[in-house]
Image: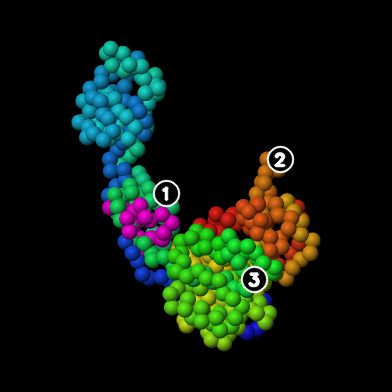
Amino acid sequence: MTATLTPVEEAIAHLLGKAPVITATEALPLTESYGRILARDYQAPADVPPADNSAVDGYALRAEDYVPGQALPLSDRIPAGSAPSPLKPGTAARIFTGSEVPAGADTVVMQERVEVTDSGILINADIKADQNIRRRGQDLAKGSLALAKGTKVRAQEMGLLASMGLAEVTLVRKLRVAILSTGDELVDPGNPLEAGQIYNTNRFTLLALAAEAGCEVVLCETLRDNRTVTRETLERAAAQADLIITSGGVSVGEEDHVRAVLEESGELSLWRLAIKPGKPLAFGSIKGTPVLGLPGNPATVLVTFLVVGMPYIRTCQGRLRTYPVGQQVPAAFNVTSPSIRREFVRARLESVEGKTQVNAYPNQSSGVLSSACWADGLAIVPEHSTVAAGDLLTYYPFTELLS
């Protein structure tokens, strides 16, 4: 395995080329679909809405029956949920938001523009046909594509599926993930620390990231720095998971066993990226199961999972979009020393004199996870580049990186 640093785009392309798309599906109640991925296209089985309905509380009438200063008699009252009778010519009907517009009516006047008298209604506004009416099929026409296969179900998708009358949807099976933290120094929270020990931060960061990514964690363990134990655990995880994610053990030290096991007993197809933080990231497989080996520093785990791991996971899930779009924002910080690696800076948007800028956390050390709590996303400093305040940088919000 060469020690040359692999460019970020090349590394991501390599991972995506090896990402197996999940074909297994499951049908679940709509109420359980949030955050999941649609396994098939959904066409509208009927028009949505199914009939013309009023967009306001008011009065339905035929526009040509309106004469300024002349009252229109009321012939009907149409509450929401009722089937209206055809409108009698030369009259108006009281109607409410969401109520079906009666046949014969072609406009709705909002109640604020109407004066009710003993002889009917006087309209204090200009009238034209089609106003304040939501037409049948204006949201979805029968047979049209409503949602495509690979769409992640958010609140709005759940609502749209419900508008089509669907109580059950077909979803992609969750990606099964094993999370392995490595290091003799790691202690679970709740236990006292001895000399030389630290709390296992990465385990909980990765558990949360996996949940946000819509994965099912089938194994979560801490590995001691032992070659045999590392090999046995990786092989056991391979029998249960679609993807193994490790933190630590991928650098060049004598106790970095994950990379060594992949070389000895599996495949190591990628190692050392031109990314900052996260240079020693590794990718390979064991017993045919992909292994994404993240570096051990806490902030690095977060950054590399978002930048490299999420496109891989999205591809496995059959998602429509594998990588976020980002936005161009002026920098509010300086970088005076160029790097051969692309840097993903923990940053957030700030408004200065009415203008949006992206500012960086002052300490970008790979061990400073509090920087990511302060930040709202990642700003990109390209390879071999300096940054002066005002320069445009690509910025990815955390929400977009995880969506």
Q: Identify the mark nearer the N-term, 3 or 1.
A: 1
In the image, 379 versus 255, the foreground residue is 255
Distance CA(mark 1)–CA(mark 2): 34 Å
Residue type (three-letter) at the residue carrying disc 1: Gln
Give the x, y percent position of residue 22.
Answer: 41, 70
In the image, 267 versus 327, the foreground residue is 267
SS assignment at label 2: loop
Residue type (three-letter) at the residue carrying disc 2: Glu
Quadrant position of residue 74: top left
Give the x, y percent position of residue 221.
Answer: 52, 71
The residue tagged 2 is 353
Q: Which mark is residue 246?
A: none
* Relative height, residue 93 to residue 337 (above, below): above
Residue at the image point whose x is 45% and y is 73% from the top: 241
Residue at the image point whose x is 36% and y is 16% from the top: 115
Residue at the image point whose x is 74% and y is 68% from the top: 339
SS assignment at label 1: helix
Give the x, y percent position of residue 223.
Answer: 56, 74
Quadrant position of residue 91: top left
Residue at the image point whose x is 70% and y is 68% from the top: 195
Residue type (three-letter) at the residue carrying disc 3: Glu
In the image, 328 versus 402, the foreground residue is 402
Quadrant position of residue 82: top left
Q: Which mark is residue 185?
A: 3
Give the x, y percent position of residue 9.
Answer: 60, 70
The residue tagged 1 is 156
Which residue appears farthest toward the top when viewing the image?
A: 118
Residues rendered magenta in the picture: 28-45
